[in-house]
Image (spheres, coloured by chain):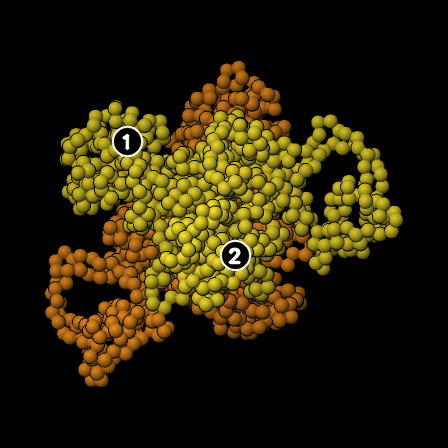
Chain colours: A orange, B yellow
Amino acid sequence: MAPHMTTLKGDKFDRPLFESVLKRRLFFTEAFEIYRLSANFKGDNRGLFDYGPPGCALQANLVDTWRKHFVLEENMLELDCTVITPEAVLKTSGHVDKFADWMCKDPVKGEYLRADHLVEGVLESRLSRGVNGPAKDSPKLEESTIAEYKNILAQIDNYDGNDLGDLIKRLDIRNPDGNGEVNPPIPFNLMFKSTIGPSAAAPVYLRPETAQGQFLNFKKLLDYNQNSMPFASASIGKSYRNEISPRSGLLRVREFLMAEIEHYVDPENKDHPRFDEVREVELPLLNKETQLSGKTTLQTMTVEQAIKSKTVDNETLGYFLGRVLLFLLKIGVDPSKIRFRQHLANEMAHYACDCWDAELLTSYGWIECVGCADRSAYDLTVHSKYTGTPLVVKQALAEPVKVEEWQATLDKKLVGPRFKQNAKAIQTAVDALDQTSLTSLASELQEKGIVTISTPALSDGRTSVELSSDLLTISWVTRTRNTREYTPNVIEPSFGVGRILYSLLEQVYWHRPNDTARAVLSLPLSVAPTKVLIVPLSAQPQFAPLVRKLSARLRSLGISNNVDSSNASIGKRYARNDELGTPLGITIDFDTVEDGSITLRERDTTVQVRGSEDDVVQAVRNLVDGTESWEQVSQRLPVFTGQGNDN
Amino acid sequence: MAPHMTTLKGDKFDRPLFESVLKRRLFFTEAFEIYRLSANFKGDNRGLFDYGPPGCALQANLVDTWRKHFVLEENMLELDCTVITPEAVLKTSGHVDKFADWMCKDPVKGEYLRADHLVEGVLESRLSRGVNGPAKDSPKLEESTIAEYKNILAQIDNYDGNDLGDLIKRLDIRNPDGNGEVNPPIPFNLMFKSTIGPSAAAPVYLRPETAQGQFLNFKKLLDYNQNSMPFASASIGKSYRNEISPRSGLLRVREFLMAEIEHYVDPENKDHPRFDEVREVELPLLNKETQLSGKTTLQTMTVEQAIKSKTVDNETLGYFLGRVLLFLLKIGVDPSKIRFRQHLANEMAHYACDCWDAELLTSYGWIECVGCADRSAYDLTVHSKYTGTPLVVKQALAEPVKVEEWQATLDKKLVGPRFKQNAKAIQTAVDALDQTSLTSLASELQEKGIVTISTPALSDGRTSVELSSDLLTISWVTRTRNTREYTPNVIEPSFGVGRILYSLLEQVYWHRPNDTARAVLSLPLSVAPTKVLIVPLSAQPQFAPLVRKLSARLRSLGISNNVDSSNASIGKRYARNDELGTPLGITIDFDTVEDGSITLRERDTTVQVRGSEDDVVQAVRNLVDGTESWEQVSQRLPVFTGQGNDN
């Protein structure tokens, strides 16, 4: 494809114009629109979008590229887990208690506002208007206030509910719609809740991420992987977040497609076996120190430098930042519009210990599209603790080691009858005690003759049990160890497919010089919804069999194509397909009937070449495979300037 | 691939053995199993399954084949619509009121039983035991009772709640678990319900089918298709049914993947433009008359005969029955285990006017895997009526026609101020009046000076309005018509991907003669989870670079492959991959190091051939493309009988 971005330069991005193209070509549409437009619809369809044919094909191609780039390339173990999730799982993972946003109610309007967005919106408005209040004649902003507001905005994600409440009070922030005061922020859990089965006794949630299903299958995955470490699982599927107030089109929605990788790694060795392949990749980084100083300056460094300088914590995290960047470039993202931003401490999800977001630049600003989090051993540990199932790796040691250590032993003959169905959970809890705990328990047991042990949840709901010295012995023993046991850490690259799709569309959108009505989406061939448009010069019947044959030929080669035999002019039909991002066009004309030759048009340059059907089909195959560029094709085949051109 | 079914013949299918293979190889697993196994889990995870790596890959390949066979082949307009659906939509479609199963509560056990399954289970048990009651010494079954029970079972799907209640009473059918009497059947709606947004005021459901989203976008799809008819939309996505009592593994689940086509057709012309391509396809049919006579005899006839004999109603429905059959054969379903069964009148979904199920034979009996329903104009009509949006096709007439007819006119100057936001809905209702209605309304308006008109739902919830003769005029006019307007009928082939996947796995499962421990899944290359297994003869380091290179080479050709470098014997590694359904195996041995030759093994026959890497890679490509068969390859390349064989 020819370079095109120059056409955009200097042009201001016109979002309404851009959106009208996407709407006209049915990339996506508001879900249930005909209901929302009807007189008595009382429902809420905000944050719900349907993908039309080109959006759906683009999404499928992005997912296919993702699967090849990550899953197939590294033999990741792909899973398809259920969306419906029992409450106990999400209670354990922390989502029931912590997966919430802060919201303020406007008691007069009865409206709910997301607290951070409220602060952000009002301060941005004050800054842009230069006055410190909603009215035009509010006092002018002081220099120091401007600096303060900018500082708040730079770390808006770092505030919790109390902080936001204080800001709202101190800066007199009100609902812009009506200027009413709002109530203090309260948390709103973002999960959709339902019940399962006729008794409706068991609450369930729609998953907020695909990760939990992967963690719960860890033991089986490790077994499937023949106990070999490190390895990764992956999932592509819908997730759900009951956003307080959806906005920004596809960027903040309530139902969305995610693609997530959970890479399991030894916490004592976070090297990656294929690190060499990304060592030299250059990352544009925005670390947390820079952000806390109120700045947004990028530092560009290789993955290797990022790790050596401790900017990025470890090889595996660095490896995935590099791989994510390569993926984004592969699908056609503008390299000058990517950055990796490190999360601030309070901004991180409750499970994460470090996180870098790949953000793409759009007309809405920098948008988080991929999160790369180090979830440490958090998830496997909590699920293991609750269920009593060990989610650990047993590594054979090269040489056995002799160790002296405390050993706890339960008298099984007594424990079984005494604790019945809980006996197994208690055994698990005792087996899981580490040396630090055993040291103190040993002396306590000697002193008092009884100790309390934390357990997985028991049948009566308790999570601890008292064990007396007739049931439990703790003794100092010498043992030979052949294996080492550890809970893996998890590095998680998590992709929001819809956000990537929208940001990409903004970045590849432009229009022909001096003609805003002729838009073009310069999607690369690999992800373009349709690869080839076939247009007969006119609706004359002699073209029809040629068109059908060519279309079937391309289809049999796995090359998606559309035929447009409508009465519109060739130029109009091409223009429609430029808006659909179709990279190649083939015209069948009177010469085709005579000598079998056809023309091939390239979308961005509108240049056409002419050749035999075999020549052109071969060129299309090469372009789709990536074995030939358009420059090469247009030098090899003669340029065509006759009938059937754009104008 | 070599024929293999002979190995199965005569062998009784052993379901526990089969399931242990699927479990061992992680095709799928009970979701949240480690929670269900933990002591205090109160939730319900029945009917929820996760697909592991081979199941997930098989599912992806089935979906990919489906997309190519249907969507790409016919340029169907694929959509991806949201699962979350506002209540109004599903109220209109009829699902809120009618999408229910009948269930009986056992008041003693507190258990809920699906009424038809209860009747079925008890009668089948009585028939198989030959006695008319739960106890061993119950009276022996009379010949006439046996005939009656068989007749009931043959039309079990034809009974509604009252019928089932009568049967339960008359035949004294009780809960097999405890022999307690059950309460009369009550309906249980099968949709999962939730709320959306912080106000939680708006109820939403998880969609029970992907169809509704497609219907609501009809107007946009027709526009996208440049107003050309007929055309089809398609969707692949998850749907949800809150089953009363999930059972039979993957066959009756609460969350499942569907692939649905909605083909929109002129009700006056249900021909299909590509009918010729399926005319000669032979369909195994079980029509409703045969079923009502208590029989299950199949009639085999071509699609053309089925339509000529009026067994199948129209060309488009027949076309899709043929296409569905071809799809099922393509993915490896046993042709002797497919039938198309017509729905009985009471069994049909509330929206359908005719329906044929493609059923696959499994150890659970014949299982509905694809439904082909003629939904007539039901859905487009009800959504159009509720929303006031015309969901119709305007067809240009070849020649304009002069018609004399009633015409209704509203006085816009009066209607606007009087009905405000409802004015548009009233205009829509008046425009939609047909000639029959207008004839009677005209005389009523003349007599009484006022008439009542049904409308789309108005802002106050009413669905009718009174119009007096100052607002409404109905007059007899002569007009020239250039267009014809109609609501399309919808033919819907609807695929349950999980059911197809499970049934296919049962049908391709067998084991090596006299060795039940060596199972094989004879999945065709096109859908097999992994195409090629690469095994080095041993863990010697000189094999590693050869293995890596070959694996990367196949991957670059888009051929999925797995490497097994474990210490297990070659035979064991092959056996593991036979259970995974991997069709081809490549061994790298000492001769490879010497002369670059490698062996290629075929799963079903275990025959191996040997050739240069280029020869073998070319053979693999041809086998995957379908341009060469294993018979051809094994005649072309020399058979290998040396080291690295199965035994």
Q: Position of residue B227 (x, y in %)?
A: 63, 35
Q: Which mark is residue B584?
A: none
Q: Nearer the viewer, mark 1 or mark 2?
A: 2
Mark earlier in primary sequence (1, 2): 2
Disc 1 packing (10 Å; few <14; some 14–19; many ≥20): some
Locate residue B191, reporting x and y percent: 53, 56
Q: Which residue is mark 2?
A: B170
A402 vs B495, left or right, is: left
Q: Are marks 1 and 2 in contact (CB under 8 Å)?
A: no
Residue at x-position 57% and y-position 50%: A31
Instruction: Give the side of residue A498 with respect to residue B641, left or right.
Output: right
Taking the image as shown, residue B217 lies to the left or right of residue A479, namely right
Amino acid on which disc 2 is placed: Arg
Whole-percent x, y for residue A430 in the image: 24, 71
Residue A633, quarter of picture: top left
Q: Image check: B393 left or right of B329?
A: right
Q: Which residue is mark 1?
A: B617
Identity of the residue furthest to the top in this view: A594
* Depicted A474 relative to depicted A196: above or below: below
For the question of whether residue A189 can be seen, the reply is yes
Which chain is home to disc 1? Answer: B
Front in this rendered view, residue A476 or B343: B343
Residue at the location (24% across, 44% down)? B516
Chain containing the residue with disc 2: B
The amino acid sitting under disc 1 is: Val
Q: Nearer the viewer, residue A143 or B540?
A: B540
Q: Is residue B4 visible?
A: no
- Element class at badge 2: helix
Per the model, the C-alpha gap separating discs 1 and 2 is 68 Å
Residue in the picture at 25% in, 78% down: A467
Q: Nearer the viewer, residue A160 or B30?
A: B30
